[in-house]
Image (cartoon, rainbow, N blue to C red):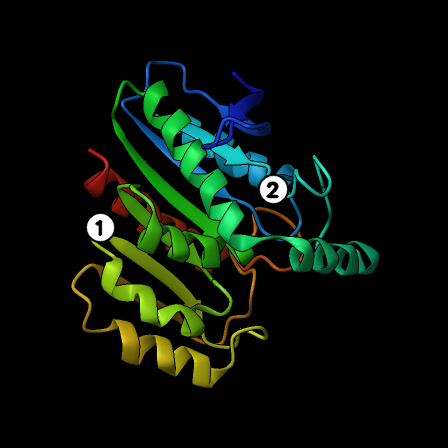
């Protein structure tokens, strides 16, 4: 069972759509999947569907809705990639975090007050880290989050388990940024960092040319085990 539903904003002055995938049995925990710059496209929906098969109810909020609802772009199409960069630049990320908080609220209600994990990719990885610092989610995973080195001043606010997947050849996160992330976070008892040697941005994309099958499966198993431990 999957499809889009409407989620009210925190201020209740509007509503946005979120793709929701439900398991066959009642779920006791939820996962919020935070989009890349390409919108809630087929790859993000497939990730939600996979979490539903694992027994979670999964939500993917449409974070571009204020500018253009239901953006769906393909990372392997150059024109789509350029369009995606434009949408990212127009996104108010502080506002996006409030929409993620609203999604957490909806997801928690859907599982009767149970725990909610968050996992994000690319832009969503950055937002997952911001959410770890600013929201009441229960566990957080960021895949190749961009610009996290500029957010390290907030890391003292992380109080729940957080995991970062870092490809060492990420074309959007240079080596000095990765070094800063390790220097700033290695001593934080709530944070676990995993490096993936020689891999580039997007290696765990559900589909397309960016995916590295072995590394994606390794990272996804680490994420699944992490959520199984912290959302039980």
- Residue tagged by mark 2? 43
Count of marks, rendered view = 2
For numbered disc 1, what is the local secondary structure? loop
Instruction: Please give the residue where the numbered disc 1 appears in the rendered image.
Output: 160
Q: How far apart are marks 1 and 2 (CA)?
A: 27 Å
Instruction: Kindly tell me whether residue 56 is visible in this rendering.
Output: no
Q: Which residue lies furthest to the bottom in this view?
A: 176
User: Which of disc 2 and disc 1 is earlier in sequence?
Assistant: 2
Q: Nearer the viewer, residue 20 or 170?
A: 20
Q: Residue furthest right?
A: 79
Residue 34 at x, y = what percent?
50, 45
**In the figure, 106 relative to 230: above or below?**
above
User: What residue is rendered at 25% in x and 57% in y?
Assistant: 158
* Quadrant in which residue 179 is drawn: bottom left
Nearest to the eye among marks 1 and 2: give it: 1
Q: Circle 2 — which element?
A: helix
Residue 54 lies left or right of residue 210; in this view the side is left
> Where on the picture, by quarter, is residue 86?
bottom right
Disc 1 packing (10 Å; few <14; some 14–19; many ≥20): some
Asked if residue 140 shows in the view, the reply is: yes
Looking at the image, residue 147 sits to the left or right of residue 73; the answer is left
Query: Compared with residue 11, is residue 178 higher up or lower down, i.e. above or below?
Result: below
Q: Residue 27 carries which label?
A: none
At a point 56% along the width and 46% down the height, the residue shown is 35
Query: Image quadrant of residue 181?
Result: bottom left
> Going by the picture, which residue comes out furthest to the left?
189
Which residue is depicted at the point 31% across and 57% down?
Answer: 163
Picture coordinates of residue 156 (x, y %)? Answer: 23, 65
């Amino acid at each position: 069972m999957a499809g889009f539903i409407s989620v009210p904003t925190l201020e209740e002055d509007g509503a946005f759509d979120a793709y929701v995938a439900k398991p066959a049995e009642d779920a006791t925990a939820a996962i919020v999947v935070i989009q890349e710059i390409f919108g809630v496209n087929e790859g993000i929906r497939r990730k939600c569907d996979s979490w539903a098969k694992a027994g979670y109810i999964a939500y993917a909020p449409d974070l571009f809705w204020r500018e253009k609802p239901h953006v769906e772009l393909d990372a392997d199409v150059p024109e789509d990639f350029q369009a995606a960069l434009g949408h990212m630049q127009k996104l108010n990320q502080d506002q996006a975090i409030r929409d993620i908080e609203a999604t957490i609220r909806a997801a928690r209600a859907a599982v009767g007050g149970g725990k909610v994990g968050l996992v994000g990719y690319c832009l969503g990885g950055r937002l997952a880290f911001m959410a770890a610092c600013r929201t009441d989610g229960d566990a957080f995973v960021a895949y190749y989050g961009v610009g996290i080195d500029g957010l390290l001043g907030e890391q003292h606010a992380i109080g729940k388990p957080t995991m970062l997947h870092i490809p060492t050849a990420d074309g959007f996160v240079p080596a000095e940024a990765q070094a800063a992330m390790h220097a700033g976070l290695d001593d934080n008892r709530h944070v676990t960092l995993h490096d993936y040697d020689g891999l580039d941005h997007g290696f765990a994309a559900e589909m397309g040319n960016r995916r590295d099958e072995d590394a994606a499966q390794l990272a996804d198993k680490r994420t699944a085990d992490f959520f199984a431990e912290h959302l039980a």
